[in-house]
Amino acid sequence: MSSKDKLTLSPIHEISGIVNLPGSKSLSNRILLLSMLAEGQTEIHNLLDSDDVRRMVEALEILGIQFEEKRAENLISVSGTAGKIPVSEATLMLGNAGTAIRPLTAAMTLGHGRFVLDGVTRMRERPIIDLVDGLSQLGANLRCLN
């Protein structure tokens, strides 16, 4: 596909249902991100408790996403923003959470503002330039700081 070609994707009107997933930090972070991008409330039962998932929740809270947690029921409710990022500026420290930084990098291109995603020294050594280049080719305005 050349840079002049465009691909238009029509949004799905509505998705509803219950999905039972195995405990996985990758799947847990994906469902958190999809819940943020959705419209309305999403209830997540038995979300995996791991450093990567905690980092994703912290990042989404910094971005203005509302959560309601019911620990006794092992339930978290996410208020979706219909694809909008509530804040226009944020620095997200993601530690060593590779399952959070890549999807969040793509999601931040939906926002209008300045977002910095960072991690520990080891995270900065991980390859992400292909993702940045791909998003740039799609029209996103982003760059690696180091």
Image (cartoon, rainbow, N blue to C red):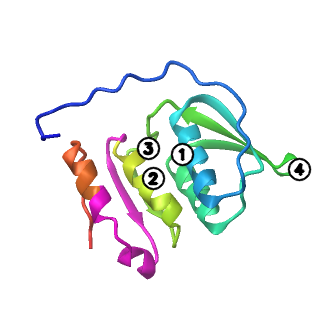
| Residue pictured at 44% horizontal, 35% vertical | 84
In the rendered image, the quadrant that contains the N terminus is top left
| Residue 128 in which image quadrant | bottom left
Task: Give the labeled residue for mark 4.
Answer: 72
Task: Give the labeled residue for mark 3.
Answer: 87
Please name which of the two marks, 3 or 4, marks the residue nearer to the observer. Answer: 4
- Say whether marks 2 and 1 touch (CB < 8 Å): yes
Mark with earlier residue (2, 1): 1
1 or 17, nearer to the observer: 1
Question: Is residue 85 at all visible to an observer of this figure?
Answer: yes
Mark with earlier residue (4, 1): 1
Task: Look at the numbered disc 4 and give the secondary structure of its residue.
Answer: helix
Q: Left or right of 57: which side holds 69?
A: right
- Say whether marks 3 and 4 touch (CB < 8 Å): no
Task: Give the labeled residue for mark 1.
Answer: 33
Tell me residue 107's x, y (percent).
41, 46
Q: Amino acid at mark 4?
A: Ala
Task: Give the labeled residue for mark 2.
Answer: 103
